[in-house]
Image (tube, rainbow, N blue to C red):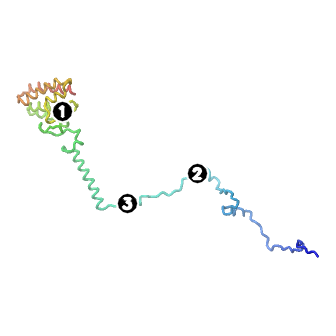
Amino acid sequence: MVCSNKLSSSNIPFQKPQHSRHFDEDFKDRYSSDTYNYEGQEIVTKTQPGSGNYEEYKKTKPRQKEDNNTDSFTINIGPFTWLFYGAIAIAIVYLIYILFNEGGSSLFTINRDKSVNAYHEITADNIENTDIDTLIKQAENEGNYRLAIRYYYLLVLKTLSLKNHIKFEDDKTNSEYLIDIQGKPFSANFEYTSYLYNYIWYGEFPLNIEKYNKAKSNFATLLNQVK
């Protein structure tokens, strides 16, 4: 007797499911994330209509909150802070004093006329900033024509120094100045005015208004040539 291992389908009883099931139409949408991507396919997220448009992006301002640093910056005003500001105020006042004081640094007074009251106060350090014209007028008003000639000669030396024809020095002689300008167009007139100065000042030659004006004209001519 041959036994068959195969069972006839007709012998298996059919069991009907008690509840019938069906899939929702949108069931695929619930399994479309990266978690359920078993095939390695790229998933593109859908965006709202118009949200990828450049014109829409250009009109939209980025919503970024800016940090307010005003709350984090504070000034601690203590006793040392007031000392610091006080030192600055003192320094400014001192700088103004130097700027306007006659005895200040030459850095601030280089373009200002020095206040000199007598010829012996004129030195190599201040001659180029000394208002010699005013000293000449004062001597003329006082009738001290010899002193006026003295100032005229100093004015000649100042002008030559400003024009870089000579270097004025306190212990330099008139002969040495003449050597410095030798060959200049005005060297002959300088030699003559040096003679007048020595004769009138050191020779104590008395001057009246007429003689003074004649000597003065020689100095004026020389100054015009140097300028």
Q: Amino acid at mark 2?
A: Tyr
Image-based side of 210 in relation to 76, left or right: left
Could you say whether the residue bearing mark 1 is in a helix, strand or loop?
Answer: helix
For image coordinates 11% across by 37% down, the residue present is 120
Residue receiving disc 1: 158
CB atoms at circles 3 and 1 under 8 Å apart?
no
Could you say whether the residue bearing mark 3 is in a helix, strand or loop?
Answer: loop
Camera-side mark, 3 or 1: 1
Residue receiving disc 2: 57
Q: Residue furthest right?
A: 1
Could you say whether the residue bearing mark 2 is in a helix, strand or loop?
Answer: helix
Q: How far is the residue under mark 3 from the one under mark 1?
A: 59 Å
Q: Earlier in the sequence, mark 1 or mark 2?
A: 2
Percent coordinates x, y for residue 41 in the rendering: 69, 57
CB atoms at circles 3 and 2 under 8 Å apart?
no
Q: Earlier in the sequence, mark 3 or mark 2?
A: 2
Percent coordinates x, y for residue 32 in the rendering: 69, 61
Q: Nearer the viewer, residue 30 or 51?
A: 30
Q: How far is the residue under mark 3 from the one under mark 2?
A: 39 Å
Q: Amino acid at mark 3?
A: Thr
Percent coordinates x, y for residue 174 in the rendering: 13, 30
For image coordinates 22% across by 33% down, the residue present is 162
The image quadrant of residue 133 is top left
Does 225 appear above or below 58?
A: above
Residue receiving disc 3: 74
CB atoms at circles 1 and 2 under 8 Å apart?
no
Kindly identify which numbered label has been placed on residue 208.
none
Camera-side mark, 3 or 2: 3
